[in-house]
Amino acid sequence: MEQLSNPTVMVNNVQVAVTPNSVMYDEGLGEQSIRAASTGGGGVEQIYSRNVETEFATVKFDMPATVDNIKLQREWKVNKNQNLVSITGRTAEGDISKTFTQAAVLNAIEVALGVDTNISIEFKANPAI
Amino acid sequence: MNDLKYELLGSFKYALKGDEQDAGWIELSAPTTKNMKECAAIKQAFFQSLPKTDAKDIEALKELQDGKESKTEMLNGDEIIAMISASSDVSLAVVYANARELFCSGIALVDGEEKLTKPLMDKMTFEDFEAMTGQYIANFIIASSLKSMNNR
């Protein structure tokens, strides 16, 4: 079995050169809870509920502070929630493709300019397709 | 020059304003001096692929045009690609490589909205790429040469 460690990241139809081993995502399936309800006579029933407030996806990656990347991160921020992020990856066992629509960069982006510094990007988006 | 609208035979998905859309057509605009390297290579490939006679290149093009039923019937994109493909003096792969660079330089917009990028071109069918290349050559790169022949 081979680990998927070299994904391709595309934002708004442009492939992004990311720092290796920095890509991660959350499907956006949110948090759920289980409670117990008594049915009487010692009986217990499970009550399952979704917290839809938490149902949004997260995509994070780092990228080197190149001129192109510095321009891109500003463009993504200015685009508000009109970005689309896709992550694809392939191993000998198969491939994975995840698309995140209506993605927005909510936090302030720090552009560190140095020898081996990176720009850390975090998108919040609709649950992964 | 007016922009050219190329209708896609095979659709592909692309990102537009935060959502995925199906591409229907490509808007092609005239090249600028930014694209002169690619245009020069393609134009030269076209003229080198013309049937060789004792006449110079422009005259060879005229002879080709005279073979058409009507003086107003100009070479179309499919004929241009067929001619380049049949020529042993020209590398079709080089023409396609230059066309790919040209289309990704900003002169092509998907559905008139989003810039056609290399990842999007990778999703395009080869049939569409070939047809689009031929039409672009006919309408923009050698258009002036074809028109001057038509007016003689």
Image: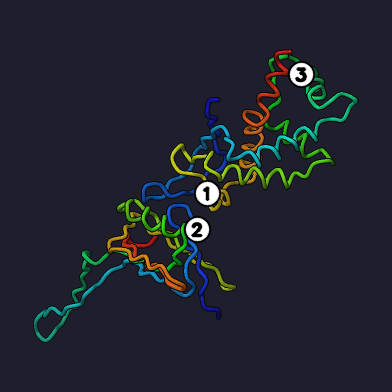
Reply above or below: A39 against B21: below
Distance of label 1 from label 3 (alpha carbons): 37 Å
Judged from this view, the residue extending furthest toward the bottom is: A42
Three-letter amino acid code of the residue under disc 1:
Thr
Quadrant placement of the N terminus of chain A? bottom right
Parent chain of label 2: A
Please identify, in this view, whether the residue under mark 1 or under mark 3 is nearer the observer.
1
Please identify, in this view, whether the residue under mark 2 or under mark 3 is nearer the observer.
2
Please tell me whether mark 2 sits on a helix, a strand or a loop: strand
Three-letter amino acid code of the residue under disc 2:
Gln
In the displayed structure image, the side of residue B79 where residue A73 appears, left or right: left
Three-letter amino acid code of the residue under disc 3:
Lys
Identify the residue under disc 3.
Answer: B68
Q: Nearer the viewer, residue A87 or B98?
A: B98
Which residue is at 81% across, 21% downward? B59
Q: Are discs 1 and 2 located on one and the same chain?
A: no
Q: Where residue B109 sits in the image (x, y, percent)?
A: 49, 40
Q: Where residue B47 sits in the image (x, y, percent)?
A: 77, 32
Circle 1 residues within 10 Å: few <14, some 14–19, many ≥20: many
In the displayed structure image, the side of residue B82 where residue A60 appears, left or right: left
Instruction: Tell me, yes or no, whether the two marked residues, 1 and 2, touch with CB atoms within 8 Å.
Output: yes
Please tell me whether mark 3 sits on a helix, a strand or a loop: loop
Circle 2 residues within 10 Å: few <14, some 14–19, many ≥20: some
Identify the residue under disc 2.
Answer: A15
Distance of label 1 from label 2 (alpha carbons): 9 Å
Reply above or below: A11 against B61: below
Q: Where residue B31 sits in the image (x, y, percent)?
A: 58, 35
Parent chain of label 1: B
Identify the residue under disc 1.
Answer: B117
